[in-house]
Structure formats: C-alpha cells, structure tokens
Amino acid sequence: MEKENIFINQSVAILCDGNNIERSIHELSNSKNAMINFDKLIPKLLKDRGLNRLLYFREGKSISSKFAERLHENYYGSVIPCHKSADIPLSIKATQLASKVDTIVIMSGDSDYVELVIHLKGQGVRVEIAAVRQTTARILIEESDHFHEITSEDLFIYKTPRKK
C-alpha cells in the first residue's frame, strides 16, 4: 500500500511592534531610512504556511499611508495606530487570535512580550519571534518556539525624494 503525502496547512498571524522593529533596524543599518522589506521577510517567516493576517502596531501619528496601502494590497495587512506603546494592543489582539490560528509570529525583541509568549503557548499556539538578534531579549528567544533573525538582507534603505 502506497503512503499518501498529507499536507497540513498551518494558519499564521504576524503581529509587528512597529516602533520596536523600526528602532532595531535603524540601529542595525545605521540609517533612519531603513525599512523592513516585507516582500522578502514574509515568505521567509511563512515557509509555505498560510497567512491569516498581518497587523502592524505603530505608536505615533507619522504612519505612511503608502506603507499602510502596500500592506493591505499585498498581505491584507492593517496598520493599527496605538495611543502609547504597542505592547497592550498587540497582546490583546494576539490573545483574541489564539483560537483562530496555529502560529503567531511576534515581530519584536522586547522582553515585555515574555508573559504573552508563555500564555499563548499555554493555549496551544506555536509562538515564533522575528527580530534583530542584537536587540532581542535572550529570555524572549528562549521562551519562543522558534526565532527568525531579521538581518540586513531583510531591509532596504528608503531614499527620500528630492525637492525640485
């Protein structure tokens, strides 16, 4: 009897603490104009798994509408403005999504997420961290199921248009 290949499709939610990741990549690249290249990073994070949703939490008013449009068009993603830090809104959303997805990828190196990681794993969710290694709390890497290192390969430097 021939054995069938069974493909199990995992559903993944990616939740990004925008301010944390932006600070990390600016430090990594020595450029305030460094941005995540989501077209490179998302496939690397998903590894043939299905993207349920991509949420980018961002404190402050200066959220590029072009960036928000690209996330929505390419990944059905949303940018969620936060009053203060992204920690609480991201944690609430992750807890709400826990019963709807198999895996949650948290894009942040902030140790404030350790309790969230422990909670989500207790709910049976696989939790992965995607961040710049040098700016990621070691305990966060240790508590997660998998660590995706964000490197300079995952960035691009945005060139500001010259004024005419």
Image (tube, helix red, strand yellow):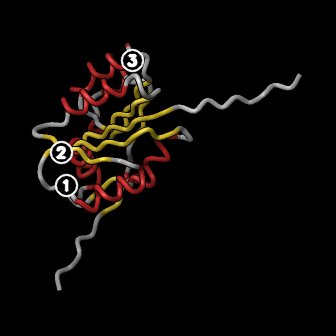
Residue 5 location (% of width, % of height): 74, 30
Pointer 1: residues within 10 angstroms few (<14), some, or many (20+)?
Answer: few
Residue 81, labelled with which disc? 2
Q: Earlier in the sequence, mark 1 or mark 3?
A: 1
Query: What amino acid type is highlighted by mark number 3?
Result: Lys
Query: What amino acid type is highlighted by mark number 2?
Result: Pro
Q: Quadrant of residue 96?
A: top left
| Circle 2 SS class | strand
Q: Earlier in the sequence, mark 2 or mark 1?
A: 1
The quarter of the picture where the C terminus appears is bottom left
Discs 2, 1 touching: Cβ within 8 Å? yes
Residue 108 location (% of width, % of height): 29, 36
What residue did someone put label 3 on? Answer: 121
What residue did someone put label 1 on? Answer: 63
**Nearest to the observer: residue 112 or residue 96:** 96
Horizontal side, residue 93 vs residue 44: left or right: left
Horizontal side, residue 89 vs residue 5: left or right: left
Horizontal side, residue 10 vs residue 59: left or right: right
| Circle 3 SS class | helix
